[in-house]
Image (cartoon, helix red, strand yellow):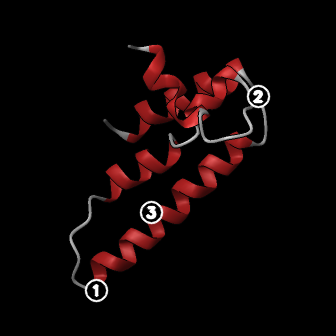
Amino acid sequence: MDRSYAYELIEWAYNQNPGPWFKHSVNVAKATENILIELNKNGYDFDVDLGYNAALLHDIGRYKGFTKSVIHSMATFFSRI
């Protein structure tokens, strides 16, 4: 999956349920990218795009609304079963 598709998904989710979780997800993705770039400079071999996309989409289940637990992280998965 490329970054543009991941961003389309997170924008879709935001349109379903706008909130501060969107900016949080973008910031987590940027932080993850920076960390992985630094780790790769130090001899590791991480896929920076994969890490960025995973971090960007980590709260995508928020499109269903707020929950008090991490169940929102699994909302998308379970809605497909």
**Image coords of residue 21 (percent x, y):** 71, 42
20 lies above or below 24: above
- Identified by mark 3, the residue type is Glu
Residue under pointer 3 = 33
Going 61% across and 47% down the picture, which residue do you hit?
A: 25
Is the C terminus in the top left, top right, bottom left or bottom right quadrant?
top left
Is the N terminus in the top left, top right, bottom left or bottom right quadrant?
top left
Foreground pick, 13 / 62? 62
Query: What is the quadrant of residue 59 in the picture?
Result: top right
Q: Residues within 10 Å of mark 3 (few under 14, many from 20)?
A: many
Chain-order first, disc 1 or disc 2:
2
Helix, strand or loop at disc 1? Answer: loop
74 lies above or below 45: above
The disc at residue 42 is 1
Going 50% across and 27% down the picture, which residue do you hit?
A: 9
Residue 52 located left or right of residue 43:
right
Residue 38 located left or right of residue 10:
left
Residue 21 located left or right of residue 40:
right
The disc at residue 18 is 2
Helix, strand or loop at disc 2? Answer: loop
- Identified by mark 2, the residue type is Pro
Going 52% across and 43% down the picture, which residue do you hit?
A: 58
Q: Residues within 10 Å of mark 1 (few under 14, many from 20)?
A: few
The reply to whether callout 2 and callout 3 are in contact (CB within 8 Å) is no
